Image: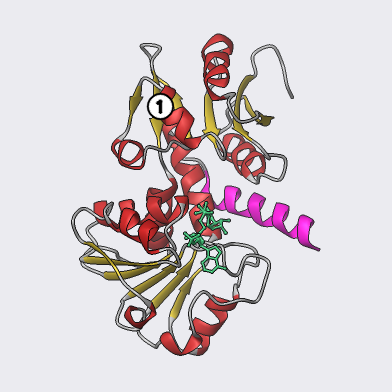
Amino acid sequence: MITGATRVAGIIGEPVRHSLSPALHNAGFQSLGLDIVYAAFEVPEGGASGALQAMRALGLVGLSVTMPHKQAVAAAVDVLDPAAAALRSVNTVVAQPDGRLLGCSTDGAGFVASLAAAGVRVDGASVCVLGAGGAARAVVDALGRAGAAAVVVVNRSAARAAEAAALAAGRGSVGDESHVSAADLVVNCTSVGMGTDELPVAASSLRAGQVVADIVYHPRRTALLRAAADAGARTVEGLGMLVHQAVLQQELWTGRTPSIEAMRAAAERELAARHQ
Ligand code: NDP
């Protein structure tokens, strides 16, 4: 029940109505027994600093940030965590006790946490990251922080690949599809396979003994993951990253860990309702 004591958190973006974040976060706050509701705020490009002023004025519990505001929020908050500073991109705003706004980036750490939850270790691994967009950059940065031995970035546009590889704590390089089969871990961070049966790399590049992760989560079992399983590789679905980056956001806002199972179930229900 919403009362005068209920507090508000939310996400800013445009478009944002399709976001799974309200389903995830409301399930998480409920699992903690907290009187907080989480809403989606459609904020057009250019509106990020106004939204941050509103956050202060209204005493919002926290804000998630999605496109097109991630860079503008990084420039407008008072302080950045190390990942957000490296990426110049923020997906989480935290109101600190002294009133300053802290900008964080939980996408990459959420990806690494989703691997850990699946029993996959990054420390010492050789990784091939497909793609060099915003999500790929966050993943490369987090792989570097988590101790990956080597991170090879393969992308259609070579200039963007070099920029992403530079985020891997000095262990990044630019490669091509021939680097896929040697990697311990292959991560698809392109949008290829989203809502289609396309593969970001040839199925023949995948092999038994590898872990293949896809950050695309619609469909849950992407064509890449199906091809990887056929080749005998272990697979990790993209929904885990979405859930774990939100779990990390709730930890930042509340200092407590919500139920990962409740948040995952809410995301699964929401996805199933949309695509039946
Ligand atoms: P961007 O638009 O920033 O990057 C897209 C990437 O995909 C670029 O590397 C681009 O290459 C590549 N790409 C796009 N189309 C093709 C193609 N036809 N052939 C080869 N490469 C292609 O998007 P994001 O990084 O924000 O997101 C990427 C995907 O990750 C999306 O599907 C998104 O839904 C998913 N995602 C999942 C998350 C999760 O929590 N599971 C979180 C965030 C994103 P180029 O640079 O050459 O253009």
Query: Which x, y percent locates residue 251?
Result: 43, 36
Segment colored magenta: 259-276
Tell me, what colour scheme is on the image?
secondary structure
- In the depicted view, which residue is nearer to us: 264 or 111? 111
Which residue position holds label 1? 75
For this view, does 274 lie left or right of residue 220? right
> Is residue 31 one of those drawn in magenta?
no
- In the depicted view, which residue is nearer to us: 104 or 14? 14
- In the depicted view, which residue is nearer to us: 53 or 113? 53
Q: Secondary structure at mark 1?
A: helix
Q: Tell me what residue is drawn at x 72 percent, y 16 percent.
A: 3
Decide if residue 255 is in sight here.
no
Number of on-image labels: 1
Please tell me whether residue 149 is drawn above or below residue 255 in the rendered image.
Answer: below
Q: Tell me what residue is drawn at x 39 percent, y 50 percent.
A: 138
Q: Quadrant of residue 86?
A: top left
Decide if residue 147 is in sight here.
yes
Please tell me whether residue 262 is drawn above or below residue 84 in the rendered image.
Answer: below
